[in-house]
Image (cartoon, rainbow, N blue to C red):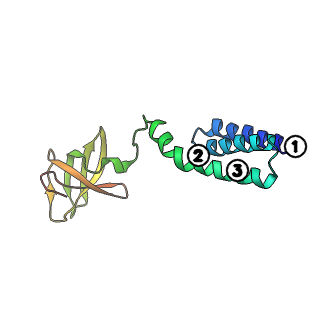
């Protein structure tokens, strides 16, 4: 009788995995299959639960790093943090005392401020993005080392 519950658990876990495709429940589905086999072989419920937990966590810890490495390899960083270290062109003079400045990077214009308050970068200057504060890029002369 317990074998049916493991089979139901397997189907539910696989269904969740298909809906999310996030590699969240597939490991537990594997544990449910092995617990199902243990139930068919007449193992006690406590043994079935132990098998489920042990196999699920073994699958999780041993195969998840490999799966993550090879699944969704075409994912591209889309967050603003990926801009740090990139070069940008100044499109409006950057002057912290006047609270002005903008740069163009990857086809988008961003508000920018100088890393050092004493620095002023005229339009046309090439700068390097050093950090992000709120919605402003913090830049410095690209010849400087971070």
The label number, if any, that marks residue 128 in the structure image: none
Q: Are marks 1 and 3 in contact (CB under 8 Å)?
A: no
Q: Secondary structure at mark 1?
A: loop
Q: Is residue 117 left or right of residue 70?
A: left
The label number, if any, that marks residue 51 in the structure image: 3
Residue under the point 15% across and 65% down: 118
Query: Residue 38 location, x and y as percent?
Result: 76, 44
Q: Secondary structure at mark 3?
A: helix
Dot 1, how many residues are within 10 Å of its Cα: few (below 14), some (14-19), or many (20+)? few
Mark 1, residue position:
1
Q: Secondary structure at mark 2?
A: helix
Q: Is residue 44 left or right of residue 18?
A: right
Task: Kindly tell me whether residue 72 is visible in this rendering.
Answer: no
Query: Residue 95 location, x and y as percent?
Result: 19, 59
Residue in the foreground of this view, choosing between 101 and 119: 119
- How far is disc 2 from disc 1 in space, using C-alphas? 26 Å
Mark nearer the N terminus (2 vs 1)? 1
Query: Residue 131 location, x and y as percent?
Result: 29, 57
- How far is disc 1 from disc 3 in space, using C-alphas? 17 Å
Mark 2, residue position:
59
Residue under the point 64% across and 48% down: 55
Query: Residue 27 location, x and y as percent?
Result: 62, 44
Dot 2, how many residues are within 10 Å of its Cα: few (below 14), some (14-19), or many (20+)? some
């Amino acid at each position: 009788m317990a074998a049916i519950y493991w089979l139901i658990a397997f189907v539910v876990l696989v269904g969740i995995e298909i809906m999310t495709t996030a590699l969240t429940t597939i490991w537990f589905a594997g544990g449910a299959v092995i617990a199902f086999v243990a139930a068919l072989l007449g193992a006690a419920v406590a043994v079935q639960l132990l098998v489920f937990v042990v196999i699920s966590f073994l699958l999780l810890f041993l195969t998840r790093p490999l799966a993550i490495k090879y699944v969704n390899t075409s994912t591209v960083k889309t967050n603003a943090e990926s801009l740090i270290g990139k070069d940008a062109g100044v499109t409006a003079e950057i002057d912290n005392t006047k609270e002005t400045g903008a740069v163009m990077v990857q086809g988008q214009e961003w508000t920018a401020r100088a890393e050092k308050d004493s620095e002023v970068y005229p339009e046309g200057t090439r700068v390097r993005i050093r950090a992000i504060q709120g919605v402003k890029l913090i830049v410095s002369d690209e010849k400087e080392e971070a």
